[in-house]
Image: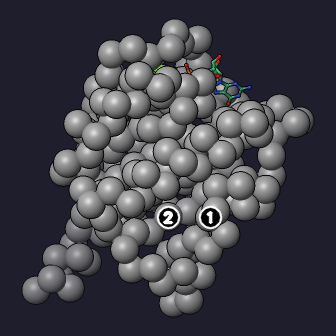
Amino acid sequence: MSVLWDWFYNLLASFGLYHKNAKILFLGLDNAGKTTLLRMLKDNRAVSAEPTIHPNTEELIVGQLKLKAFDLGGHETARRLWQDYTTTVDGVVFLVDAIDRQRFPEAKRELDNLLSSDELRGVPFLVLGNKIDMPSAASEEELKYALGLVDTYGKDVSSQFHENDCGACPIEVFMCSVVRRMGYKDAFQWLSNFLN
Ligand SMILES: Nc1nc2c(ncn2[C@@H]2O[C@H](COP(=O)(O)OP(=O)(O)OP(=O)(O)O)[C@@H](O)[C@H]2O)c(=O)[nH]1
Ligand SMILES: [Mg+2]
């Protein structure tokens, strides 16, 4: 039965007739580009955003995903709110400013906190290294290393061989430029494989 349902569901999805519903948190340090990404996904344009103080919630459609996206502020005081949103979350999009090398350790610390939280156990994490339009941006390899994410799930979800069989949470790093509309589509495609 479930095989038949999967087949039917994939068929509908392939025609864009079915959307997966998912509650997704947009997290990451301040200035990483979370609100810019949300606005881009929502209105397809880059608007300059003020630092987020109050959480924004938006309903978005990204490919086959219907997302309820929660964009939370990333500055230190706003981070205290993150834990109020982590229950019943289907996925986390964690943005990192790939130009700001000095803050990679801080980003790693926050990411590690999230990864070790009980509430987010098993939840897929999409890590986006943003701002690769800037020549000084870190490479994917450098960012993975700095974040301690050398063994990630693997981008090819259909592959039987995943670099990391952590079981607990699929996590992968994709590099992107929100303002240039580069990189994040494949990334959301990857994430959608882990959402029901
Ligand atoms: N070069 C470049 N700048 C970007 C990109 N995406 C966002 N920015 C800039 O990064 C700055 C911060 O973007 P926001 O979207 O406000 O960052 P945020 O993560 O929402 O920050 P908080 O709300 O403070 O947590 C803004 O000046 C954006 O224009 C990108 O792809 N490339
Ligand atoms: Mg913001």
Marks 2 and 1 in Cβ contact (< 8 Å): yes
What residue did someone put label 1 on? 149
Of residues 112 and 61, the one drawn nearer to the viewer in this rendering: 112
Residue 10: x and y in percent read 30, 69
Q: Which residue sits at x=40%, y=51%?
A: 114
Mark 2 Cα shell of 10 Å, populated few (<14), some (14-19), many (≥20): many
Three-letter residue code for mark 1: Leu
Tell me where residue 23 sits by quadrant: top left
Which numbered disc, 2 or 1, marks the residue closer to the eye?
1
Residue 109: x and y in percent read 54, 48
The answer to whether residue 117 is left or right of residue 33 is left
Mark 1 Cα shell of 10 Å, populated few (<14), some (14-19), many (≥20): some
The answer to whether residue 170 is left or right of residue 45 is left
Residue at the extreme left of the image, as rendered: 1
Q: Which residue sits at x=51%, y=90%?
A: 160
What residue did someone put label 2 on? 171
Q: Quadrant of the C terminus?
A: bottom left
Q: Is residue 170 above or below residue 56?
A: below
| Figure coloring | one colour
Asked if one can make out residue 93 in the rendered structure from this viewpoint, the answer is yes
Residue 111: x and y in percent read 50, 50
Q: Secondary structure at mark 1?
A: loop
Q: CA distance from mark 2 to mark 1?
A: 8 Å
Asked if one can make out residue 35 in the rendered structure from this viewpoint, the answer is no
Q: Is residue 82 above or below residue 16?
A: above
